[in-house]
């Protein structure tokens, strides 16, 4: 098996991350973004996440960035400050190798250490691999919301999944 390294984000990662994310914007309904952000936009977004201290993990093989995962506030309103939402993206050349599971496992660990009480995953309906990955890591399905996003001339729904990280947090 290919050896993958999980490490913190660096601003020099932004070009590779923008290429990975652009693939999903242009070719899938995994994200409801319609326009792919450029490297500068990615750098600004991820630097802001890193400055907040939120978990942000980069997957690397050799010198190649092959994926990323992050967790940030589920919503911006202050009462949601103990709940995070995750995002995980892998280079299409590295799907099905267990790297997504490694990224999610590390993200869960770092999110718990950060002090989040629970993590939410918002997943496009029909993306069975993502749903299975989250179930494998203990996420439960909370509900489905049909026809929320319109992309590629079609309506797409989402599923909400949740995992408790620090259930005793008061």
Image: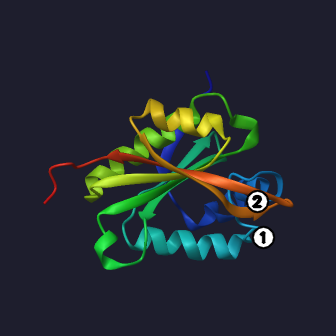
Tell which of 2 and 38 is nearer to you: 38
Q: Residue at x 27, y 52 (%)?
A: 113
Q: Residue furthest front?
A: 146
Report whether 137 appears left or right of 130: left
Rendering coords of residue 103 (x, y %): 50, 42
Q: Residue furthest right?
A: 153
Q: Badge 1: few (under 14), some or many (20 or more) residues near its Cα, within 10 Å?
A: few
SS type, badge 2? helix
In the image, residue 136 above or below residue 146: above
Report whether 22 appears left or right of 157: right
In the image, residue 111 above or below residue 79: above
Report whether 35 appears left or right of 165: right
Q: Badge 2: few (under 14), some or many (20 or more) residues near its Cα, within 10 Å?
A: some
Rendering coords of residue 123 (x, y %): 58, 50
Q: Residue at x 38, y 52 (%)?
A: 119
Rendering coords of residue 50 (x, y %): 44, 68
Tell which of 156 and 114 is nearer to you: 156
Q: Residue at x 86, y 61 (%)?
A: 153
| Residue contact at pointers 2 and 1, CB within 8 angstroms | yes
Residue 35 numbered mark, or none: 1
Image quarter (top left, top right, bottom left or bottom right) of the C terminus: bottom left
Image quarter (top left, top right, bottom left or bottom right) of the N terminus: top right
- Locate residue 52: give its quadrant: bottom left
SS type, badge 1? loop
Rendering coords of residue 58 (x, y %): 54, 51
Residue 31 appears in the figure = yes
Instruction: Indicate the colouring scheme.
Output: rainbow
Q: Which residue is mark 2?
A: 25
In the image, residue 8 above or below residue 34: above
Tell which of 38 and 9 is nearer to you: 38
């Amino acid at each position: 098996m290919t050896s993958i390294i999980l490490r913190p984000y660096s601003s020099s990662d932004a070009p590779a991350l923008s290429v990975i994310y652009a693939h999903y914007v242009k070719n899938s309904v995994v994200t409801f973004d319609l326009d792919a952000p450029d490297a500068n936009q990615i750098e600004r977004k991820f630097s802001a996440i890193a400055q907040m201290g939120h978990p942000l993990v980069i997957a690397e093989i050799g010198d190649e960035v092959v994926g990323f995962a992050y967790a940030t506030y589920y919503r911006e309103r202050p009462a949601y400050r103990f709940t995070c939402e995750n995002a995980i993206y892998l280079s299409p050349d590295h799907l099905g190798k267990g790297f997504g599971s490694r990224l999610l496992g590390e993200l869960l660990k770092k999110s718990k250490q950060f002090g989040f009480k629970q993590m939410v995953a918002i997943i496009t309906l029909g993306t069975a691999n993502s749903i299975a990955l989250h179930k494998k890591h203990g996420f439960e399905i909370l509900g489905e919301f049909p026809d929320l996003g319109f992309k590629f001339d079609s309506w797409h729904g989402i599923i909400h999944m949740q995992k408790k990280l620090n259930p005793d947090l008061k």
